[in-house]
Image (cartoon, rainbow, N blue to C red):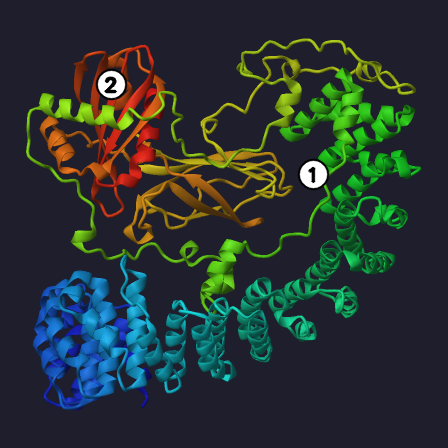
Amino acid sequence: MADGRFFSTTKKGEVAEYKNDLHSLDRKSQKNAVKRVIAAMTVGKDVSSLFPDVVNCMQTEDMELKKLVYLYLINYAKTQPDLAIMAVNTFVKDTQDPNPLIRALAVRTMGCIRVDKITEYLCDPLQRCLKDEDPYVRKTAAVCVAKLYDISAEMVEDRGFLDVLRDMVGDANPMVVANAVAALAEIQASSSGPVFVIDGAVLTKLLRALNECSEWGQVFILDALAAYTPADSRDAEGIVERVAARLQHANGAVVLSAIKLILHAAKYIDDAGARAAIHKKLAPPLVTLLGAEPEIQYVALRNIDLIVQSVPGILSHEVKVFFCKYNDPIYVKTEKLEIMIKLADEKNIDQMLLELREYASEVDVDFVRKAVRAVGRCAISLEPAAERCVNVLLDLIQGRVSYVVQEAVVVLRDVFRRYPGRYERVIAPLCECLEALDEPEAKAAMVWIIGEYADRIDNADELLEQFLEGFPEESPGVQLALVTATVKLFLRKPSEKPQALIQLVLSYATQETDSPDLRDRAYIYWRLLSADPDAARDVVLAPRPVIEAAADGVDPALRAELLGELGSLASVLHRPAAAFTSAARLAVRRASQLGAGGVGVSRSTSTAADEAGGTAAGGSAGGSAAATPHVPTPPAPVPDLLGDLLDLGGADADAATPAPVQAPTTHAAAGAPDVLDLLGGLSVSNGAVFGADAGRAAPGAASHLPVLLAAEAGKGLVIRGGVEREAGGQLAYQLHLENAGAGVPLDGFMIQLNKNGWGLVPQSQTIPVPQLAPGASASARVPLVQNPASATPALTPALQVAIKVSQLGVLYLADAVPLAALLREDGRTSPEAFVGAWQALPDAAEQARTLPLVIHAVPAAQASLEAARLFVMAHKSVPGAEVLYVTGAAGLPSGQRAQLLLELRFVPGQRGVATVFKAQETSLAPAAFDAVAAALS
């Protein structure tokens, strides 16, 4: 049927023509008119004005016409909710039609029309269709329940649809069972309580239906069974035995879901031999997945990567399967290479090295680099094979291919750090390749090798001099390496030429560079060499810890989570689903699940204060007056070792007066030139660096933010940040980013927050900062909103943050949300409401702690508390103490507020504030104590 002609009309006034044809008595003309309307709607034209005319065409026996009208209704019902009610009677009538296809079509369409006014009319037809005699109608109605739950969860629960769905799990038709399981799983994902609990009886029903389901029905059932916890080892073995046949399925999704379930069940099998046998059965289906087209291969390889990390020996005899073919796309080759490295052992390393040597001669430069780096990773992780790996790297270096040599130099630097002093015979061939090095990373690696082995390289000073000729034009990473290597050379060979080199390098690095990192490091070395050369030797030449095998795999906690998501997008991206799923879809909560503070009977404030005071005294009598408050600990910043060496302290750097460098109290070792004479000719313009008032961190708006990710963990990017509440009440994530050592400009910054107690999500995932050149920094604010769909059940301050950088990939860091940022400006209540709420809460809602604070005057304390949005409701003097009754309100993700009630009892001028907390949300007590301590500190 050539329906393309309906998209080609260009006539004017066509809406009026559509209207006339829609009212035609000729069914063929009417159908063609509806098709033209659908075509116009598809290309973006607004034909919503025809809504009543199209709805009039619903009452027809023509299935094709009815489908077209239903398609139009789904698209425009939201914009025409009042007119959409016109179609309700026809929907209800169609759900009773003798034709099961029409009944199913009607209930499916009603579920797709997300209009509240229609929802209430959907319940009765849906109730009938769930118990329809035709399985096609029942399976369609099961999916409709999930759609209805997304619109009105309370209605679904009140009408008993969830119970009907649970009963449908035992339906005689496997299609119905599969759809019921899919609907229950979707509802469970958006519900805070248990919706679909699998017990022994349900397990038997699902396993029975598994063999007769369609392939996607099997995926739904297998995914649901992966959440079942076997009762014992025998139960787990029974599940594996029933599911094992799915491993031979032609659909890769079924195979991956079956593997996920088997891996889960195998954890509960006590017999190690039985577990090993089960794992061995998984190898053939995993290998079979690699025979599909490249896109499916990639998905399979990403999942295999996770499985290999979890069960290392599962594919140890199948390494040849992962050898790259000449026509494999680069994304498949890269994944195969990663898995090969993880499968490397003493038995297969020789054939792997032969294969990697072949890859190093391919035309794809990026893949060649990855192959060379793979050889080095095998050397680091597999000590018995290190000698063979180094020999392969030497052979590659002899080929004199520039990019191969440079990658080999970088790899050998790591080999030297893994096996110090073992492969010094490699140094001579490396030194012959200096002319081939033109990339910053390779140059920095070669400079490190020369500096580290300066005492064993006869012409080390000449080699470094070659690099120093272009010192001003080198990248920051190479310059830093040159400064360190020159100092090492001088300390290992304190002769005339190294003396001249170090004077040249430190002179440039302290006077002519714009890089603060380079300048600071040069000052550090200068101060060390000037003050105590022996100490400098101990610091600079100290033995470095041996590096361990590179942790290239997924974090164990994340891996365990991703194994439960095999076959999904999360397992392909190797990221938790919460890191990339949209936060726009709001979770549905019943009104009874929303927290609300109660208000009880009002009594006099003084009477309530006496009772509350007695409770506080009793609650805190057993505690120590010097108890340490519970303060949420942000990720610890890297210790500032340089500041300790230079005695950099607390004064402001801008106001500091340059202090002269003191004469050294110790002298150089015998035979070494006088270091003071060596550096005496250098002029220091910024002498404040060496004084007691030398600068701390660079002043700026971000100086108060804690370091969440140091340069070492952030691949050269330093991240400071924290959640704050701005003047207008807007929540924002304040960030300060510094490109401290990445070596390349950074851009494309994006942020994502994992599910957290407060449901915080960024309004936009883009971090508005410009490109950060090496050494540059920038601050940014990311507005936050509270979304119930991103909230965890527990109101904990923990906040997991993922920041993506185009050049560095995804960086994960941990933060804490201070309660002070969640406190609202409208948190004040009346004294009567305070008393009523305090009395209404049970004793179990009360917690006490003594804060190690000193309050000198009540007015000052009241001002400090109210500045932090903690409002003083009443002040009372009791014998020997002062009592403040304080309240505040924190905004919950659901839009409700958590009212906090606090009593502060103290003696002015004495240390110790006995604090009693009461609230419906008792988990907020530690954060409330922290907020009080921060406000009064």
Q: Is residue 741 in view?
A: yes
Q: Position of residue 814 (x, y in %)?
A: 46, 42
Q: Residue at x 87, y 57 (%)?
A: 398
- Tell me, yes or no, whether the two marked residues, 2 and 1, touch with CB atoms within 8 Å: no
Amino acid type, callout 1: Gly
Q: Is residue 473 left or right of residue 499?
A: left
The answer to whether residue 869 shows anywhere in this view is: no
- Number of disc labels: 2
Instruction: Give x and y (percent) for residue 327.
Output: 66, 75
Q: Residue 590: which quarter of the image?
A: bottom left
Badge 2 is on which residue? 862
User: SS for tag 1?
Assistant: helix
- The residue mark sitting in front, 2 or 1, is 2
Is residue 199 toward the left or the right of residue 375 in the image?
Answer: left
The front one of 426 and 35 is 426
Q: CA distance from mark 2 to mark 1?
A: 52 Å
Label 2 crowd bin: few (<14), some (14–19), many (20+), radius 10 Å: many
Residue 449, numbered label: none
Residue at the disc numbered 1: 477
> Which residue occupies 41% across, 50% down?
754
Q: Quadrant of residue 925?
A: top left
